[in-house]
Image (cartoon, grey):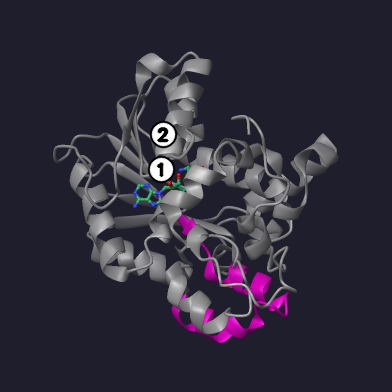
Amino acid sequence: MSEETRDSDSGAERCERGERSDHDDDRTRAQDLSSLDPERYYDEYGYEEWDRLEATLGGHLEFEGTTTYLERYLPNSGCVLDAGGGAGRYAVWLAERGYVVTLVDRSRRQCELARAKAREHGVADRVTVERADLRALPFADERFDAVCCTGGPLSHLTDEANRERALAELRRVARPESPVFVSVMGRLAVLQNLVRSAEYVPGVPAMAESGTYDADFAREHLAHLEEPGFTACHFFRAAELEAVLESAGFDVGALVGLEGIAANVGERQDLADLEPDAVEAVTEAVRGLRTDPAVVDWSNHILAVARA
Ligand SMILES: C[S@@+](CC[C@H](N)C(=O)[O-])C[C@H]1O[C@@H](n2cnc3c(N)ncnc32)[C@H](O)[C@@H]1O
């Protein structure tokens, strides 16, 4: 498969929409939980990670919301860490604005794509890509003028102690008082998707309680699915995100619902099928309500803007 080929329908999309897998009728085969390993999942997800922020209305709103807050809170210049930066959408965006960017990601494939995208966009001289884990960042203390951890890397740590470790690392490498942007996946939005599908309903009470989707969850509640969708993920409530950031020593300035009132709707709408005026009208309405606490909690992605 070429680097630029997209799967027509990924496990992530199926799970996030709460739909059945392709093989649901074959109940005799062993459950395949390989996609629950985030490293493997993102290696296989490949180019789709670059594409996702401009493929759908939901992706557009996530990117537009995140970059709005980056523009508002970033210093005018400096070194920025893009932690769990995937295929480099934000790294390229930042480098195009003059920042010196270091992207780290655990997926070898995403690192390769990020290097290729930095070259393709003519910013390779300002983007360094290193394969590394959020929980053990290979950088000196207070090295960065700003830190981004967007699109859910923290959500892919399903163990609470690992999330705490990652947040301690993000704070350690950030200059004191510098802005730190962390976005995670929202629990209420995923619950709404699970409720939509009879196949995923057995997992609803446990998801409501713990927010954690992992191999134990799949074995216990989704044993009837040969191949549960998506990858291991902790889905957050907004207050929970604020609390863990504060416990890690961050000062939380803003909580933002990136998809806002278009949560769980925008991800089903291809951007190419929509009139630009309609996209702008929805975007404007989403902008106006993004920090309403109810809207924040219902979003697919919740962004926290904090100070180290
Ligand atoms: C949905 S992508 C987000 C990419 C990009 N930051 C964005 O906002 O579009 C999540 C990324 O987090 C990475 N990731 C997950 N767990 C990680 C970890 N423990 N350390 C480093 N990267 C991780 C994945 O490999 C994946 O590229």
Residue 111 got which mark?
2
Compared across the picture, whether 153 is left or right of 162 comes to right
Instruction: Look at the picture and state if 188 lies above or below 270.
Output: below
Pinpoint residue 126: horizontal percent, then vertical percent.
36, 19
Pinpoint residue 25: horizontal percent, then vertical percent.
75, 74
**Residue 225 sits inside the magenta stretch:** no
Q: Quadrant of the N terminus?
A: top right
Which residues lie in the magenta part? Answer: 182-211
Residue at the image position 76 percent from the left and 41 percent from the top: 271
Q: Give the residue number, with chain letter if any, for mark 1.
A: 107
Q: CA distance from mark 2 to mark 1?
A: 6 Å
Label 2 sits on a secondary structure element that is helix
Q: Is mark 2 within 8 Å of ligand 1?
A: no
Question: In the picture, residue 85 is in which quadrant?
Answer: top left
Instruction: Look at the picture and state if 217 lies above or below 280.
Output: below
Q: Which of these two is toward me, 214 or 287?
A: 214
Pinpoint residue 86: horizontal percent, then vertical percent.
46, 40
Q: Residue type at mark 1: give it.
A: Ser
Compared across the picture, whether 199 is left or right of 171 comes to right
Residue at the image position 14 percent from the left and 37 percent from the top: 140
Using the rendered image of the protein, determine whether residue 121 is visible from the camera's viewpoint: no
Secondary structure, magenta segment, majority class: helix
Using the rendered image of the protein, determine whether residue 144 is visible from the camera's viewpoint: yes
Label 1 sits on a secondary structure element that is loop
Compared across the picture, whether 173 is left or right of 30 comes to left
